[in-house]
Amino acid sequence: MPRRLGRSAFNRPTLSVARELLGKVIVRSHRGRRIAAMIAEVEAYKGPADKASHAAGGRRTARVEPLYGDGGTVYVYLVYGLHWLLNFSTAARGRPEGVLVRGILVDTASGRKLVAGPSNVTWHPKISKKLDGADATVSRDMWIEDRGMRIPARSVTRGPRIGVEYAGRYWAAKPWRFRIAAAPANEKDKRKKGNRARSRE
DNA sequence: TCTAGGATCGGCT
DNA sequence: GCCGATCCTAGAT
C-alpha cells in the first residue's frame, strides 16, 4: 500500500533524506491525470555553510524562501533563463537545506526509462513555478509516496555534485550526489563539468 | 536602473 | 568539444 511521505520524512538531516528519497515515487496530479516518477538521482544542498547552495552565507530572498520552510516544502526555480528545477526542502523550518531531483525513472509504453537532467525531471511530470512553495506533505497537486522499494547500499553511487564549480573546490568536491547505480550516469554532465572548471582557470 | 551570471540542454562541428 | 538559447535574480550603482 503506497504511503505518502509526511513531515517527519523530510525534517531530518539532509544527506539522510537525499539518500532515502532514492526509490521513492513523485506523484503529480495534473488535469485529472496522475503522473508517477521514481526518483533515481538527487543532490543535497546544505544551507548557509554550503557555498553551492542558493542559501549560501545565509542569503534569504523571495526566491529561496521555500528552502527555509518546513521539510517537504517544494522549491521550483529557473536556471539559465529556460530550465525549471525541482527541489524539496529538508531539515527543520528556518534551516535552508534541500534536495535537488536530478533523475527519475518513468513508465512508458515501451517500458521503464530514465529521465536524466534536472530540467527534464520537471518537464516530464509537468512541474512548474506554480508548485513553488507548495507543501508536498499535504498538497493535492504533488507528493511523494513510499511504495516499498528499498535500494540497498551497494546499489547507491555517490559522487560530487554537478555544475557547482563556482562554489570552489572544497564544496564542489563534496560527495553529495546520490544515484541508483542501475540508472545510467549522465556522462555528458560530467564531461561538461570538467570543461567548465578548466575554462575558468 | 543596470549588469553579470547561473544547481542546463541539445545540436552542431 | 563547443556554443547558443533565453530570462530571472541578486547585487551594484
Image (tube, coloured by chain):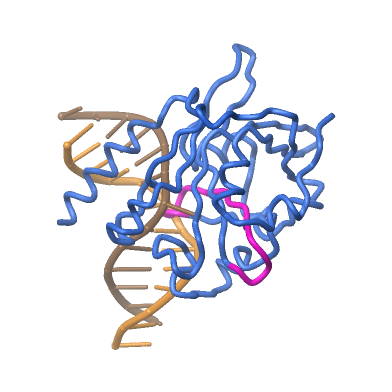
Chain colours: A blue, B brown, C orange
Tell me which corner region of the image, top left, top right, bottom left or bottom right, holds residue A22: top right
Position of A113 with respect to A163 (left or right) is: right
Query: Which residue is depicted at the point 54% across and 51% down?
Result: A15
Question: In x, y percent, where is residue A33?
Answer: 78, 32
Query: Which residue is depicted at the point 49% across and 22% down?
Result: A182
Question: In x, y percent, where is residue A133?
Answer: 68, 60
A4 relative to A63, above or below: above
- In the rendered image, the quadrant that contains the C terminus of chain A is bottom left
Q: Residue furthest top?
A: A110
A17 relative to A60, above or below: above
Position of B13 with respect to A177 (left or right) is: left
Tell me which corner region of the image, top left, top right, bottom left or bottom right, holds residue B9: top left
C9 relative to A16, above or below: below
Question: In x, y percent, where is residue A13?
Answer: 60, 56
Return the residue nearer the eye: A59 or A134.
A59
Q: Is residue A187 magenta?
A: no
Return the residue nearer the eye: A125 or C6.
A125
Q: How many marks?
A: 0
Position of A32 with respect to A90 (left or right) is: right
Q: Residue furthest right?
A: A1
Q: Which residues are magenta?
A: A79-95
Q: Is residue A86 magenta?
A: yes
- In the rendered image, the quadrant that contains the N terminus of chain A is top right
Question: In x, y percent, where is residue A148?
Answer: 74, 29
A137 relative to A149, above or below: below
Query: Which residue is depicted at the point 74% across and 44% down?
Result: A143
Q: Residue furthest front?
A: A153
